[in-house]
Structure formats: C-alpha cells, structure tokens
Image (tube, grey):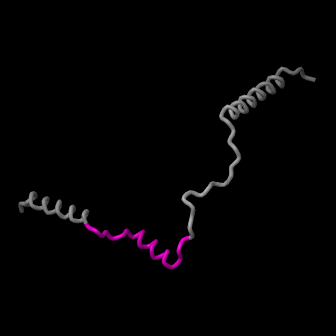
Amino acid sequence: MPQQHGHDDEEREFDLRWADDAEHKEPSARARMLAARWRQNPPEPQPFRADPDPVAPRRSAWVSAAVVLGAVAALILLLGYARFRPPF
C-alpha cells in the first residue's frame, strides 16, 4: 500500500507547532507527586545555598609532597643503616 508522506509530514509539523504553542502544559508525574506531597506536608524554607560545615583548612600540595618525600628518605636511611650496621 503506498503511503503519502508529504501530507502526513505537514500535518505532523502542524501538530508539533500546535503542541509547543499550547498555553497550558500538563505537569510531569514527578511534579504532580511533589505537589500532592507538599499539600499534606509542606517543606520547610531552606536558604538558597546552606553554608557547609566548617572544615579544617587543607594542606598545600607542596606540604603533602614534602611529607611523603621526607618519609621515603627516612625509610631509605633506616634500611641503609640496618644493612650496613656491624653485627654484634
């Protein structure tokens, strides 16, 4: 059966424009669920962005690298001292 694509495409384009230009669009299922929940139990007001809990200042990357390199150097010295120590 031959189909007429030209006429159907024009009707579909009209339908999409008509739907996009609609004044009222139905809310999503999530929006309806939240609206129903908030009618029974409204949420408490929240600030736009709550201040995070105070956190200790972070160490600089250089300080962290120095601590790691110092520990590695101390380990190498300790192993070298244990190897070359005269036996008792």
Where residue 34 sits: x, y (%)?
A: 46, 71
Furthest toward the right, the residue is 88
Q: Does residue 45 sit above or below 59 in this rendering?
A: below
Q: Residue at x 21, y 61 (%)?
A: 17
Residue 42 magenta-drawn? Answer: yes
Q: Residue at x 13, y 59 (%)?
A: 10
Furthest toward the left, the residue is 2
Name the quadrant containing residue 13: bottom left
Which portion, as a residue range, is magenta? 22-43
Where residue 72 sits: x, y (%)?
A: 73, 29
Q: Does residue 52 sit above or below 63 in this rendering?
A: below
Query: Which sits in the foreground, 88 or 65?
Result: 65
Q: Is residue 37 left or right of residue 10?
A: right
Q: Does residue 51 sit above or below 72 in this rendering?
A: below
Where residue 2 sits: x, y (%)?
A: 6, 60
Where residue 42 sits: x, y (%)?
A: 53, 74
Q: Residue at x 42, y 69 (%)?
A: 31
Q: Quadrant of the N terminus?
A: bottom left
Name the quadrant containing residue 29: bottom left
Q: Quadrant of the C terminus?
A: top right
Name the quadrant containing residue 11: bottom left
